[in-house]
Image (tube, rainbow, N blue to C red):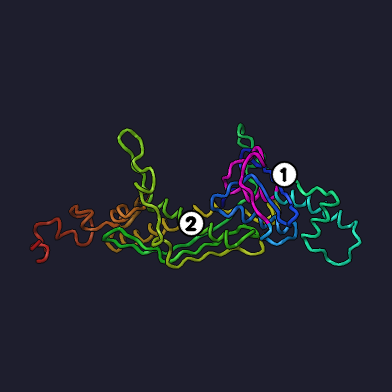
Amino acid sequence: MFGLAFTHSPFNQAGALVHIYLDGSVLVSHGGCEIGQGLHTKMAQIAASALKVPLELVKIGDTSTDKVPNTSATAASTQSDLNGMAVLNACKILRERLDAFKATLKETEPIPWVKFVNMAYNARVDLCAHGFWGNNIVKFDFAVGKGRPFTYFVFGAACSEVEIDTLTGDHTVIRSDIVMDIGKSLNPAIDIGQIEGAFVQGYGWCTMEELVNFPNGSYYTLGPSTYKIPGIIDIPADFRVYLLRDVENPLAVHSSKGIGEPPLILGTSIYFALADAIASARTEEGIQGYYSLPHPASCEQIRLSCRDAFTDPTPNAGIKGESWVTRETVPPPDDLRRV
């Protein structure tokens, strides 16, 4: 359950600038940064749908404050919500102008888009519009800790199956299933990719990315060169993502929901699956009761948690096989004696 919105109310606003040119192309500028999350693609889709033009005619301009001032941070999975509503607002203004102009014409046949735009230009119809969106739902008082901190919530659940090697601490993710409620997705292909990527990032966070400090407190692990991150081989062998259908969300553009950060925490399903697998291995060794699995659950931690005669050679530890390691009265096997 992940809350969507900036808790600081003034950040929940966005602007957009939309131009229509004589060749029929549309240029959209908005306040969000494209950082690989597919934001520009979604904004282009919103504009194309609102103006009723082919998607290939819509171009997105580079994000800059000389086009849209006072932009909010591209963070917290809010940009499709905020900038999408601003783009939609600008396009609706243009559509209203064009529809009003069209009502004055005596044409009975459909007019091609490019011809229609030129006719509107010749009639001195403004083909530029500024759109704005301000979310007034979020109102939270930090002083008293009361109010509404989020616009809405994104919901998700995940289940993972893993296999561990009790001798090396290595593990394999056999299968992961994810189901997400993200409203009516603006672009399912993008959103499924975001879910998969966030899940794998969360998986890496709770199983690989171990932070190491120098004695003075500074980090030795400053990036992927000094700590591990997931690779292709770490992706679940059977990876399934499901989106709930026909979910209404009137609080965001086209009933969608923000996506990107929410699925990250679902990667912990692998951590808990590892914990269960370790508990099973410990049960086979005759060890009962609770144990603590450090975070992240690295190979080292998994191996040490799978207690056996090698990791806990204490006499009378109640671990099968410990007697020939710790007691001189029981001779070791021939192969160990030779070593």
Principal secondary structure, stretch drawn in magenta: loop
Q: Quadrant of the C terminus?
A: bottom left
Q: Nearer the viewer, residue 117 or 8?
A: 117
Task: Report helix, strand or loop for mark 1.
Answer: strand
Q: Nearer the viewer, mark 2 or mark 1?
A: 1
Residue 24 picture quarter: bottom right
- Rendered image: mark on residue 25: none
N-term-proximal mark, 2 vs 1: 1
Callout 1 crowding tier (Cα within 10 Å): few <14, some 14–19, many ≥20 = many
Disc 1 marks a residue whose amino acid type is: Phe
User: Mark 1 sits on what residue?
Assistant: 132
Residue that appears at 80% across and 55% down:
118
User: Is 174 drawn above or below residue 315 in the view shown?
Assistant: below
Tell me the magenta residue range. Answer: 58-86
- Image x and y of residue 17, in percent: 70, 46
- Image x and y of residue 105, in percent: 90, 59
- Image x and y of residue 196, in percent: 50, 59
Is 286 contained in the magenta span?
Answer: no
- Rendered image: mark on residue 199: 2
Residue that appears at 64% across and 64% down:
245
User: Is 240 drawn above or below residue 104 in the view shown?
Assistant: below
Is the residue under label 1 in contact with that under label 2 (CB below 8 Å)? no
Disc 2 marks a residue whose amino acid type is: Phe
Tell me: 97 left or right of 196: right
Residue that appears at 73% across and 45% down:
131
Is 73 contained in the magenta span?
Answer: yes
